[in-house]
Each structure stands twice: as structure tokens, then as C-alpha cells.
């Protein structure tokens, strides 16, 4: 899993911080499974892409 978080604030005239803005993005999220079913000769491998960039290609 790869995450991206961005936070920004404006600096006010009196030196304080104001107008907070936050963004949170899941860049990659994948589930991977592998193993065998019934006997070691029947193997499987499954990988699921769950993030938006995996689903839409963008």
C-alpha cells in the first residue's frame, strides 16, 4: 500500500496559521494471494489492484 498526504496552511498577518487544506490519496493498494488447492500440483496466484489508478489506468 502506498499513501500520499498533503497538508498546507496560509500564514496570517499576526504570524498564526489559518485556512488549513488537506489532501489524502491512495496511490497503490493491492491484495496478493497465492497457494494451492486440493494438492500442491494445483497452484493459484491472484493479485487485485484496488486503487483508482489501477482501475482506470490513470
Image (spheres, grey):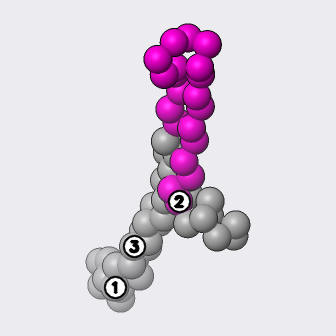
Please tell me the numbered disc located at residue 22: 3
Q: Between label 2 and label 1, give the one nearer the viewer.
A: 2
Say which of 9 and 14 sits in front. Answer: 9
> Does 52 sit above or below residue 10?
above
Q: Between label 3 and label 2, give the one nearer the viewer.
A: 2
Region rendered in magenta: 32-51
Q: Between label 1 and label 3, give the one nearer the viewer.
A: 3
> Does 13 sit above or below residue 7?
below
Mark 2 nearby-residue class (10 Å; few <14, some 14–19, many ≥20): some
The answer to whether 44 appears left or right of 20 in the picture is: right
The answer to whether 31 appears left or right of 58 in the picture is: left
Say which of 32 and 7 sits in front. Answer: 32
Q: Secondary structure at mark 2?
A: loop
Among the 4 quarters of the image, the one containing residue 27:
bottom right
- Check contact, mark 3 vs mark 2: CB within 8 A: no
Residue hosting label 2:
51
Q: Earlier in the sequence, mark 2 or mark 1?
A: 1
Residue hosting label 1:
19
Amino acid at each position: 500500500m502506498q499513501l500520499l498526504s498533503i497538508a498546507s496552511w496560509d500564514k496570517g498577518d499576526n504570524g498564526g496559521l489559518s485556512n488549513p487544506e488537506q489532501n489524502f490519496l491512495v496511490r497503490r493498494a493491492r491484495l496478493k494471494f497465492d497457494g494451492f488447492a486440493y494438492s500442491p500440483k494445483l497452484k493459484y496466484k491472484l493479485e487485485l489492484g484496488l486503487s483508482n489508478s489501477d482501475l482506470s489506468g490513470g
